[in-house]
Amino acid sequence: MARWLKQSKTVEERAEANKQVRLTVETILADIEKRGDDAVRELSRKFDGWDRPDYRLSQSEIDACIAQLSEQDLTDIRFAQTQVRNFARAQKGTMQELAIETLPGVTLGHKHVPIASVGCYVPGGKYPLLASAHMSVLTAKVAGCGRVITCAPPFNGKAAPAIVAAQHMAGADEIYVLGGIQAVGAMAIGTASIKPVDMLVGPGNAYVAEAKRQLFGRVGIDLFAGPTETLVIADETVDGELCATDLLGQAEHGPTSPAILLTNSEKLARDTMDYVERLLKILPTGEVARQSWLDFGEVIVCDSYEEMVEVADRIASEHVQVMTDRDLWFRDTLQNYGALFLGPRTNVAYGDKVIGTNHTLPTMKAARYTGGLWVGKFLKTCTWQIVESDEASAMVGEYASRLSMLEGFAGHAEQGNIRVRRYGGRNVPYGTAASPKAAAE
C-alpha cells in the first residue's frame, strides 16, 4: 500500500483557494465585457503597474527589443524554434485528409481547417517565459492560422525583450504588452483596440487558467494549463540529488506548483528529501521553490512498480519524469499524463525550453481526458459528403425517411422523401415513411 512520507495541502484547503479565484475572475471578466479598454487599462495599472497609450508594440519597438539581445541569445532562440517547428510539421504530416466512397455514388470525407484567429498568452510576470511563444505562436503558424496575436505581461516595468523577440521570430501578427486576466479577457471578448479571437491558448497562473475556463464556449481554448506540476517516478537506479534537482526545477515556477516523488524505495525517498533541503539553501530561486515544496510537495513510497502506475494515473500530472530500470514499460503502461520524460538523460526542462515537444500541457487532472497543445489543436477536422448519382440519393433517402419517422421528425423525413420522389421516381405520401423500394414495387 502506498505510504506518504510528505503530504501537500488538503483538498479542502485547495478548494477554498480555488473558490476565491473563481469569484475574482468572474468579476473582472464582467467588467471587461462592460467597459472594454477602460477596464483593461485600470486592471493593468492595478496588477502590473503598467500603462501606455497603446498596448500593442510597433515594429520599431519590436526591433528595439530584438536589438537588446546578444547574437548568442538569438541563435539559441532560433535553435529552439527550429526544434519546435520541425516536430509540429512532423505531427501535422500525420493528419491526413480523407475521401472515401462508402456506397456506390456516395463519398464521405474530412479536411483539416485552420482556426482563423488565435490569441496566445505568454506568461512572464515573474520570469520572462519566452519558450511559451515558441509553443503557441509558432505551432499555430505551422497549422496555418491566419491571425495569431500574443499578450505577455511587462517584466521589470517594460516589455520583456526576450519574449518579444521570440514572439516576433515565431511569426506573431500582433504583439501586446498586457498580462493576466485583463489580457485573456481582452483577446476573447474584444475591445475597441483589440479585435477578438476565436481561440485562446497558453499557460498561466491560477487566475489565467480560470479566466480561460470561464471564457470557454465563447472562444475555444487549448486546455486547462494552470500552475505547473511535476511527478518524478524513480527507483534506486538514480540518486536523491538527481530527483531533488528535478523536483525543484519545477517547484521554482511558483508557490502553488505541485512537485511529487513517487518511488518504491524508502531510502531514495528520504535521500531525496534530504537533498531538497540542502539544495534549497543554495538555489537562487529557493524562496519560491521552498514555499511550493512546503505546501504542495509530496513523497510517496509504493510497494511495487504496478502500484506506482496506479498512483501515477490517479495523480494525472502535467509532467511525468520516469527514471527506473524499466522506463519503456512505464511509457507503454501509464495512461494519464501530459508529457513523459523517459530516463535520467532527459528532464522536464528540456521539454519546457528546447527539445521540440510542446510544453503547454494539461494540469489539474485534465490529463485524464486530454493531451497537450499540438498542431492538431489549431485545426478543425470538418467532415463533408457528396452524393453523385440519382440512385444513391433515392436509396439513402428511403432510409433517412424511415429513421426520421421512427424519431417523430416528419420534416427530416421529407428531406429524404422529396429526393426519393425526384431522383427515384416514386410517389411517397407527404409526411410518411418511405417504404422499401422492393416492397413498393
Image (cartoon, helix red, strand yellow):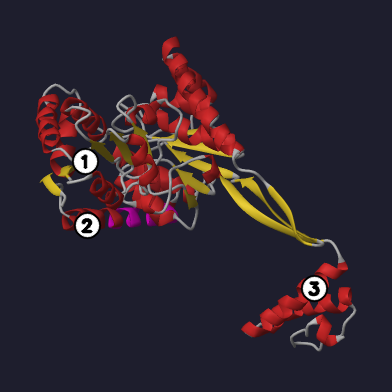
Separation of disc 1 and disc 2 at Cα?
19 Å
Which residue appears at 52% of the width and 37% of the height?
A: 149
Disc 3 marks a residue whose amino acid type is: Met
Identify which residue, 196 or 281, lies in the foreground.
281
Q: Is residue 420 above or below residue 49?
A: below
| Residue 387 seen in the current view | yes
Mark 1 and mark 2 lie on one chain; the one further toward the N terminus is 2
Find residue 53 and report its image quarter: top left
User: In the rendered image, which quarter is residue 65 located in?
Assistant: top left
Numbered disc in front, either 3 or 1: 3
Q: Which residue is mark 1?
A: 260
Span highlighted in magenta in the image: 23-34
User: Type of residue at label 2?
Assistant: Ala
Give 344 or 158, whichever is nearer the viewer. Answer: 344
Q: Which mark is residue 178?
A: none
N-terminal of the two: label 3 or label 1? Answer: 1
Q: Which mark is residue 15?
A: 2
- Relative to 127, is 417 on the left or the right? right
**What amino acid type should be assigned to the residue bearing mark 1?**
Ile
Which residue carries the number 3 mark? 395
Query: Which of the 4 image quadrants contains residue 232?
Result: top left
Q: Residue furthest right?
A: 425
- Where does the C terminus fall, quadrant-wise? bottom right
Neighbor class of circle 1 (other Cα within 10 Å; few <14, some 14-19, many 20+) is many
Q: Among all residues in the image, which is located at the extreme top? A: 71
Question: Which of these two is toward me, 417 or 328?
Answer: 328
| Secondary structure at numbered mark 1 | strand
Residues at marks 2 and 3 touching, judged by CB atoms closer than 8 Å: no
Q: Earlier in the sequence, mark 2 or mark 3?
A: 2
